[in-house]
Image: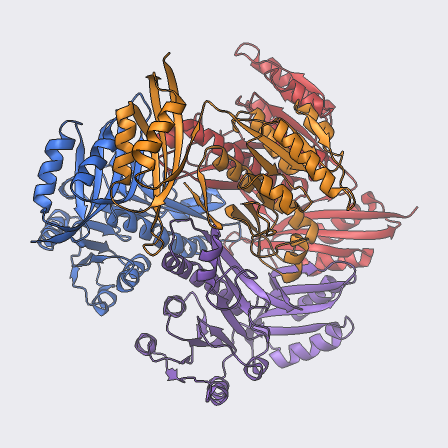
Chain colours: A red, B blue, C orange, D purple
């Protein structure tokens, strides 16, 4: 049986001559055309090489399994690569967690409906009922999991189960105002994207707009990052800022901030969907 | 004797009806034309009113002293104002302190020579000899005051004396890499502008570019602020950022940062020269 | 009967001493507090003075009519002012005209629903049926007025009648893809805001994204302006740009451009609602 | 004899499978390490492939001549490539042409002196004497070639001869206010970088700041582009903008514009020096 394969190969390996040659020769031998390629070498002391390569095989008899098996043997093993291939034929599934603010959720849903976010959204989970109608208007199941100190661990377990059952590939915290436990985070390592409403590392933690107001900064920001056990300390995917002045009260900062949040979150989600992000230590490479 | 007066009036007083009317009626009665006016009210709880008003008296018999005396009696006292008038006839004197980096100094000197900075620069003080030639090429006296732990207090005293003797109105730390003592700072309250090479409050202290690199931020910044006793905690005048990526090594951040630093510092200095900045608590109002 | 009045006074008059004094003395005598004030003088050759002043009268026996009559007699007539006062008690009515693209309409409706746009939206008019459901979901009447060369004049007349009947204060063309006739434009002078999907004056007319792609620009933009008889030549209210590169195909520009369009249009609409915009010749003063 | 080679390979060829593989296999066989690679495919209708590859050969017995000969035979010919290799061992020579404005020249000279621009600057040519001292202070020969309608052709010929004699690789028009003839331009195709003081294609031609002021735009810009026979129509390398308002007179636009000009020009010059720019038709690919 003949088929088409479009894959996005992400690799990390010790830097040395022959990597690009090895990979591209392999793909060429398979009959693949390289549609896009980006690479990054860390400084010589660390000596790591990262690459994202998008390739296309037309009308091939190869299966994904065979392709990956061959790649592992012929290229990855000799060059000591960590690698993965994501196929465009697999439409990613994105779970969303929210609380009461609707701007980030709305932005994601609108872009999803317009086709800008090529994902399925199997579910939205919230600790409040407020955004049920909005979510269901888009035809997406909404799960209400109210959280209090007593039931938090259990609710997280329920959320984990819902997300697992939905086969979601990643989770977006679209202003979800609960701190996730180590248990939750370790369940989905490198798979949870959060939008924090400040220019990290400035104003980590609660009430960033209020703190920005108090400090009298002249720019406010937002940061999209992967969630790790250290609150607001995970690898940053994208950030942006907007200019403010003494005229802006805290509420104005909140309003202006909403626009930055939704833009930055969208850009981060798009980068994640397109497999442009490689996490390396506590930093990201965004090709 | 008849003369022209152009003044910039800055006021702060309890917010209540009649302030603009009182001030503008007074100026009108003096024969002044109001060239520009900006105002700001803090939230009702604090209840303060700030205003900057630029006025022009043509061919007046009034002296500055008489004008100020009348203003105090007729307007400022009844309305419980703190106020000052700066006259464009007084060209401000700007002292500069630097260490080894030349980009901020060069920017200030070039803009000064082109007429963009309407100030006199009576002296440049440095703890290194490196920038002597550059400074003297612009015809500005350069004072070398090398600092070590043993002589720091004495050197600061010498700097204070030099600045006092020069009758400087304000001091710009154009990447001066020494922390000023409480003694120095209290000598020139609200008169020292520093450029810090990060987006404060992120990366306060030493090595901000290195720390920004380590954290993996996607924007780097610079902050111009008034110097207070708390290092990097003074009232912020201006800030800006530039986009960076995983491709940028620490040295690249340093290079990119130079451009932000010199722009932000210039904007802050211009605002200070034009009497657009009012410090209120630990924040600024920049009209 | 006692009431509160918050007004936004916009004035234009020949520049001379005493304007601020005259206006603020008048308002003070009425018992008004000045909440905000901005002014602008054109160059001396033209010699015009513009001002926006927001004032508040608490618990006053004055009616708007009496206030305006007094102002005209005591201040405006002697100073040869053109002026108007808009009262915050009058919630503006905003008519929207669209074609098929939903992003600008959606942005306006979302911000309206969230309270960011303090207006009523009495109707949406479109030459296509596509956005009926979206509009009606927000509880807003949708009028379908399909246009072809034969019926265009008549359809415009129907639109004029609908807008008049709705008592709309201004009209937003949220990507309405028909050129309005002189007849329509002259019916609502200075009351029609259009969003053009380029950085005017570059790429006026049709297909700006395609033309931007062909020219190979490195930034694309959007422009919000008041509509005049000269297509894409009316007074500009706001503009913004986004960075693009050789990687972006026309469709990418369209997608990126959507975000700029909706931001710029929103800012222009907010400025108009808050009476911050004065049209002067073919330019705007945006306080 | 053994030596090191660092080369930047730029290629353009019909898009097809095997290009990356072919090039990287060749380089690997030579013993080269690929330091950086970027590629771009135009839309399938045009079907072109562009690539920039930076490679390093350590301690090789190969000469540049042999390397290029082999590459042509084994890779370029079969794949119908247009290509060139620039070697970092060849420090580019940059000629500068100016008139009276010093800000772009100063920016280039400062960055050159600080090492940010890894070029030699063999000469500055000007139609005015104004910038002689500035230029010579940096130790660079200054040639005064005053132009009038009668001698323009001859002066251009003299400039061509000076630039040829200096073996300059490219020419930067750092606000050179003369239109170059077809004769001059065709002498250095794709080798002349101009900074135009507007956001092209808006405000092409003379007096862009005045025209921007008259039109009432809310952003002003600058554009760096390669010079072609069509004035201000050549391939754009970089652009940027700054926000302006009704408060800015023409002179303010000129002053603000200077900062954009020098930044945009610098970025374009750096991209050119690093062989990041490929001209394709009337557009650029900037890797």
Name the image quarter holding residue D34.
bottom right
Q: Measuring from the top left, give residue D155's x and y in whole percent.
A: 46, 87
Residue nearest the viewer, comparing D18 with C195: C195
Q: Is residue B81 left or right of residue C186?
A: left
Q: Quadrant of the N terminus of chain B?
A: bottom left
- Numbered circles on residues, count: 0
**What residue is drawn where x is 51% and y is 38%?**
C267
Residue nearest the viewer, comparing B192 with D113: B192
On the question of residue A276 being in view, the answer is no
Q: Is residue B249 above or below residue D34?
A: above
Q: Is residue D49 left or right of residue B146?
A: right
Q: Measuring from the top left, give residue D30's x and y in whole percent.
A: 66, 71
Name the image quarter holding residue D63.
bottom right
Residue nearest the viewer, comparing B18 with C22: C22
Q: Quadrant of the C terminus of chain B?
A: top left
Q: Measuring from the top left, give residue C112's x and y in whole percent.
A: 57, 27
**What residue is drawn where x is 47% and y is 60%?**
D211
Q: Is residue D28 above or below residue D221?
A: below
On the question of residue D127 being in view, the answer is yes
Residue nearest the viewer, comparing B269 with D251: D251
Q: Measuring from the top left, give residue B51's x and y in whole percent.
A: 26, 36
């Amino acid at each position: 049986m003949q088929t088409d394969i479009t894959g996005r190969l992400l690799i990390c390996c010790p830097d040395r001559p022959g990597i690009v040659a090895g990979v591209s020769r392999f793909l060429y031998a398979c009959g693949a055309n390289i549609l896009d390629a980006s690479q990054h070498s860390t400084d010589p002391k660390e000596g790591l090489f990262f690459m994202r390569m998008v390739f296309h095989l037309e009308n091939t008899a190869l299966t994904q399994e065979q392709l990956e098996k061959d790649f592992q043997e012929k290229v990855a093993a000799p060059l000591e690569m960590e690698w993965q291939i994501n196929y465009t034929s697999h439409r990613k599934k994105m779970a969303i967690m929210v609380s009461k603010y609707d701007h980030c959720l709305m932005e994601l849903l609108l872009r999803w409906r317009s086709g800008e976010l090529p994902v399925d959204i199997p579910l939205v989970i919230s600790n409040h009922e407020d955004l049920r109608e909005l979510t269901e208007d888009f035809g997406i199941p909404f799960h209400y999991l109210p959280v209090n100190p007593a039931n938090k661990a259990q609710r997280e377990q329920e959320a984990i189960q819902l997300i697992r059952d939905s086969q979601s590939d990643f989770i977006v915290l679209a202003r979800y105002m609960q701190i996730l436990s180590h248990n939750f985070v370790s369940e989905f390592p490198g798979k949870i994207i959060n939008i924090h409403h400040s220019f990290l590392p400035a104003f980590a933690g609660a009430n960033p707009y209020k703190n920005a107001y108090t400090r009298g900064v002249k720019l406010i920001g937002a940061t999209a990052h992967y969630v790790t056990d250290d609150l607001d300390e995970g690898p940053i995917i994208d950030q942006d800022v907007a200019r403010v002045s003494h005229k802006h009260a805290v509420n104005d900062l909140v309003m202006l901030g909403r626009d930055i949040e939704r833009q930055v979150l969208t850009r981060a989600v798009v980068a994640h969907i397109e497999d442009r992000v490689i996490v390396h230590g506590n930093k990201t490479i965004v090709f």
